[in-house]
Image (spheres, rainbow, N blue to C red):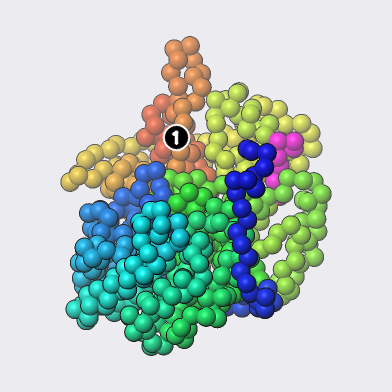
Amino acid sequence: MIARPAAKYHAFPPVNLVDRNWPNRSITQAPIWMSTDLRDGNQALFEPMNAEKKMRMFKMLCAIGFKQIEVAFPSASETEFGFVRQLIEGGHIPDDVTIEILTQAREHLIRRSFESLKGAKKAIVHVYNATSKTFRENVFGMSKAEVVRMAVDAVRLIKAEAEAMPETEITLEYSPELFTATELDFAKEVCDAVTEAWGATPQRKVILNLPTTVEIATPNIYADQIEWMHRNLARRDSVIISLHPHNDRGTAVAAAEMGLMAGADRVEGCLFGNGERTGNVDLVTVALNMYTQGVHPGLDFSDINAVARTFEHCTQLPIHPRHPYVGDLVFTAFSGSHQDAIKKGFSAHKADEHWSVPYLPIDPADVGRSYDSVIRVNSQSGKGGIAYLMETENGIVMPRRLQVEFSGVVQRHAEQLGGEVSADDIWDLFARTYLDPAAPVRYREHHLYEHGGVQGIRLAVDVEGTPHILTGEGNGPINAAVHALHSAGIRVQVRSYEERSMVPGSDDGNAQACAFMEIAGSGNGDFYGVGIDGNIVTASIKALISGIDRMGIATLAQSTEKAA
């Protein structure tokens, strides 16, 4: 760092908006939401999602309630093009969902983009070109007039392509890339030229997306820019102002919220803030911020854990334990004084009253989190010590969420015992909780087989002492075992899975495999199961059955055949 940063950097000049109104406004209704997880979020991944993961993410976004989803940059690669075709040809797009594609303002890319949309009922075509002075002069060497002409020519081509595809309802979206670094009067000039070229009307609106392509100023400056455009754009009644904040300064959420107060109608972003560099705006946070102010966002995060696990699976990105609303630790109080206040708040709270429990801005139950996770121990009161003893004494390195879960088990045991809990006591408690062979469902053996390119399993279990033989097929042994249990009326979903080698416990150096599986059943919450065996597949199946036992799902359908 240099001694005088002002010699190298300068503050962004304020907007001349002395009578700004946005500071006196509040958010009273949900905006139009647009998820760009499959485009902006995906292109920022070290390893972009494959088609299977993109489809899984798309279906989850639909289930959450997104009605506009940017699915691809189809002219960028055959993979992106193919995914759009898969969505359309496979009939995967719900009638109330509009897919969106991105293209640069170049003729061959626009034409290729429209090829990807053939057969779609409706779509948003999102076109952009850079408008800032730095890009005009230093990157492209273009005049203002050339930049405007580039945008208008692209829009006219999109209009012609749309007219040649009357079976598809096309909506135009235009982004002046690097809007926040563009002179406001020029940004207005380009946007007005676009709406005129498209022939925007109140019945056929244009989406004008005004992004913080790179966040370069405080969020109040962005709000001023949005309000200025809101006041001065031509055909305002024919325009949807959209926000696309990035998080380079760490203020994307504030920028989105202030931008909505400044007159914007729509927000683009990603679940949990994934995206280029520091990410796009975190839509979960913006939505649940509204929810805690009494405004329903129109998105459903009733099972935030399921959303989080799907996101982590598809993106291979971990969610920070302190991430707002969804992090593993955000509803956790480690401080004794905090714990006391929360307990008293819960005791005083009545179901028909407004939520006012100390340290909890939202009722965890509203997002599918249990109250058991709210008050837990930390390293000073046992959690860290439990994890350390389990690793050093027993060779088991527990996943974070299992650490949290098991620490609650130990804490309750310690409170009942009224004394110190030794390392042996902790292991005995772990074994009784997760590894007890006397549980209602008991693993006996399994046999794997291949059938038609899929994995099959013949699973032998005892249910309350009665032997059963179950069969199932899937894309792997765990999936096959889940399907085998489904055939018996035991329906669970695997939320997460981890496997680790235990510290060798014998002189020959042979290590045991330890499998950790987080499962969920209908309305039963999430539970961890643990399996230990010399064979990792066996350990995994034991973990699945352990989780089922802990969930209390142990009843097989009457039609299940008993083993001979």
Measuring from the top left, give residue 85's x and y in whole percent. 23, 63
Q: Quadrant of the C terminus?
A: top left
Q: Is residue 240 left or right of residue 286?
A: left
Residue situated in front as seen by the camera: 401 or 79: 79
Query: Can you tell which quarter of the image residue 377 is in?
Result: top right
Is 381 within the magenta? yes
Q: Quadrant of the N terminus?
A: top right
- The answer to whether residue 483 is above or below residue 291 is above
- The answer to whether residue 114 is above or below residue 272 is below
Measuring from the top left, give residue 366's x and y in whole percent. 60, 65
Q: Which residue is mark 1?
A: 499
Measuring from the top left, give residue 319's x and y in whole percent. 53, 48
Residue situated in front as seen by the camera: 483 or 454: 454
Q: What residue sits 59% from the left and 46% below the top?
A: 8
Q: Residue 326, can we see it?
A: no
Give the secondary structure at mark 1: strand
Extreme top residue here? 507
Q: What residue sits 62% from the left and 32% below the top?
A: 387
Q: Residue 512, can we see it?
A: yes
Measuring from the top left, give residue 335's x and y in whole percent. 77, 46
Q: Is residue 331 left or right of residue 78?
A: right
Q: Main secondary structure of the magenta part?
A: loop
Amino acid identity at mark 1: Glu
Mark 1, residues whose alpha carbon is within 10 Å: few (<14), some, or many (≥20)? Answer: many
Q: What residue sits 37% from the left and 64% below the top?
A: 143
Q: Which residues are magenta?
A: 375-382
Q: What residue sits 65% from the left and 48% below the top?
A: 6
Total marks shown come to 1
Is 240 within the magenta? no
